[in-house]
Amino acid sequence: MSIPDTILTPPAPPRSLVLWRRFRRNRAAVLGLALFIIVVLMAALADVVTPGDPLRLAGTPLTAPLSVAENPWGTDQLGRDIMSGIFHGARISLAIGVVATIISIAIGIVIGAVAGYFGGRVDGALMRVTEAFQTIPSFVLLLTLVAIFGSSIENIVIAIGVVSWTAPARMVRAEFMSLRKREFVDAARNLGVSDISIIFREILPNALPPVIVFASVVMATAILMESALAFLGLGDPNYASWGNMIGQGRAVLRTAWFCSVIPGMAILLTVLSFSLMGEGLNDALNPRQKK
Amino acid sequence: MSIHIPPLLTYALRRILQAIPIMLLIMVGSFLLIKMAPGDTVDALVGDMGGADPAFVARLRAEYGLDESVFVQLWRYLMKLAQLDFGWSYVYEQPVLTVLMARLGNTMLLMVASLTVAFVFGITLGAFAARRAYSLTDNVISTLGLVFYAMPSFFLSLLMILVFSVKLGWLPVGGIRTIGAFKTGWADVIDVARHLVMPTAALSLIYLAFYMRLMRTSVLEVMDLDFVRTARAKGAGDFRLMVHHVMRNALLPVVTLLGLQFSTVLGGSVVIETIFSLPGLGQLAYTSVIKRDLNMLMGIVALSSVIVVIVNVLTDLVYAWLDPRIELK
């Protein structure tokens, strides 16, 4: 009597489950995920835990942390509640990080895909543009864009996206250059599939995983850029931003260190969470790299 | 008889020629970008005067050539750039180039100091971690690298000021020299060095972390290669093996990254120079944004791009020298 094959070989677990198991084994990556969840929760619960405008007067100026129940993390020189600023600032940091990353990855995918797929002169021209963007110091370009178009939160997000697409574009281009010669692309082309369909439906899904891992780096950089802008006083003044809190805390650094150290730790831990998760994801996708 | 030109020199010349279209793209791009800004120089001048009659405004526009079409203005701008004329700064009442040159030295000093610190400590710690891969030392170094990478440079600067200037009083809070001290000779060198310690540390830390991580991976890869095993079999000692055989090859990706990142480091100097009141290009970029000195901003973009191109050509040459397999074509 023969047994059907399906009983002898159990079905392979879905790929996402395999990735999660590998990710879970990496303690640093799990720590990163935990930190990230905390930041997301702070952003989501900002209005519940610390209701009201974070920029309003909420207590005696320069109250030290853990001394008054109303302002558990203390207040700054204008009497603004620091805990409220951190919780509401988490929203701004995450929103700017996510949207700027989507913009930069989207520009990077289009430019990298077109350059890598078509090659030749198209590639040459697009790569010159990419090199030009890589040559200008990105923070100087960011300052110039903000100086010209103004520092509303929308402009800042777009400007950060515009100065950080070159690395993703180069990655996508390299992937496309190696994938476009594969049989499945030839097969699709022989079937009369259009170039656009081949680029987005056939090649892109295969080229995406390393770009998604790299997105964690882009997001970390985007958050650092926004906080640096806000630190210099060039951010959007209508929103609580960690960078801006540090910049303002600088004036009272000698007497009230907590005004800048608390938001500083918030940025540090948030960026660290992205790095740790990115590492874990990278190891999970390329298990052979690590012995 | 043909003239013999060393291949390295022709290679350098070819790389510089390749950079010309990119520089042209940057100049045209930054010019068009500035033209998109609401208001021009004349608007700013008239605004400062508190208004003026339309005939005067029109005469000013004609005087600055702002009444011509954008393309005529662009052509004039490029022609002037070719003669190293970066225009006039209405904030400093001086030619843009004069102001830029007065500050270039300080920025270059900060760049060279920061990249040297990042490179030397980065490759040493990276190689050290790789030699003891997956040990406690390696884990500590690698974790520190991630923390360094996540540390915003301006936050680190404030922490250092708090500890080393405010609490301990060891280092000056800002500037490039002690004002009014007029030191000369070695005393002056030491004075400048003391002012550069914190800015250098703040600017180099994140790149130190980068080079460390890259060097660790790179050394681990090279140590598995055949020629290292051969050298070991021939009786090369541990130190000789690391320095002569492994390091030289493992350095290649780090050198590439160093060239690629130079422009990012230059961008980072904006924040650091502003915090430590270092009179360099970065601080100038910040004040130009605040005072809307767009001519100056364009000058900074142009000059920093030229510096980045030169540094990239130099790193390519170092790469070619490190790796004899590279054909100079």
Image: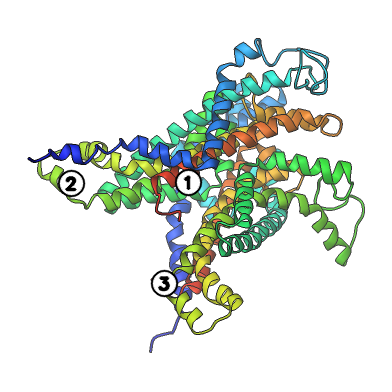
Between B214 and A188, the one lying in front of the other is: B214
Q: Residue sitting at 66 percent across and 14 percent down?
A: A50
Q: Is any atom of residue B310 visible in this view?
A: yes
Rounded to the nearest angstrom, the CA distance separating label 1 from label 2 is: 34 Å
Check disc 1 and give the amino acid type.
Phe
Instruction: Place residue A63 in its image quadrant.
Output: top right
Spot occupied by residue B183 in the image (x, y as percentages of width and height): 90, 60
Which is nearer the N-term, disc 1 or disc 2? 1
Q: Mark 1: few, some, or many residues within 10 Å (few <14, many ≥20)?
A: many
The secondary structure type at the circle numbered 1 is helix
Which residue corresponds to mark 2? A184
Query: Is there a contact, CB below 8 Å, between mark 1 and mark 2?
Result: no
Residue that extends furthest to the bottom in the rendered view of this protein: B1
Closest to the camera, between mark 2 and mark 3, is 2
The secondary structure type at the circle numbered 3 is loop
Q: How many marks?
A: 3
Q: Mark 3: few, some, or many residues within 10 Å (few <14, many ≥20)?
A: few
Tag of residue A30: none
Tag of residue A133: 1
Between B183 and A181, the one lying in front of the other is: A181
Check disc 2 and give the amino acid type.
Phe
Q: Is residue B140 above or below residue A258?
A: below
Q: Chain of mark 3?
A: B
Q: Residue sitting at 39 percent across and 86 percent down?
A: B2
Tag of residue B326: 3
Residue that extends furthest to the right in the rendered view of this protein: B181
Closest to the camera, between mark 1 and mark 2, is 2
* B189 left or right of B210 in image: right
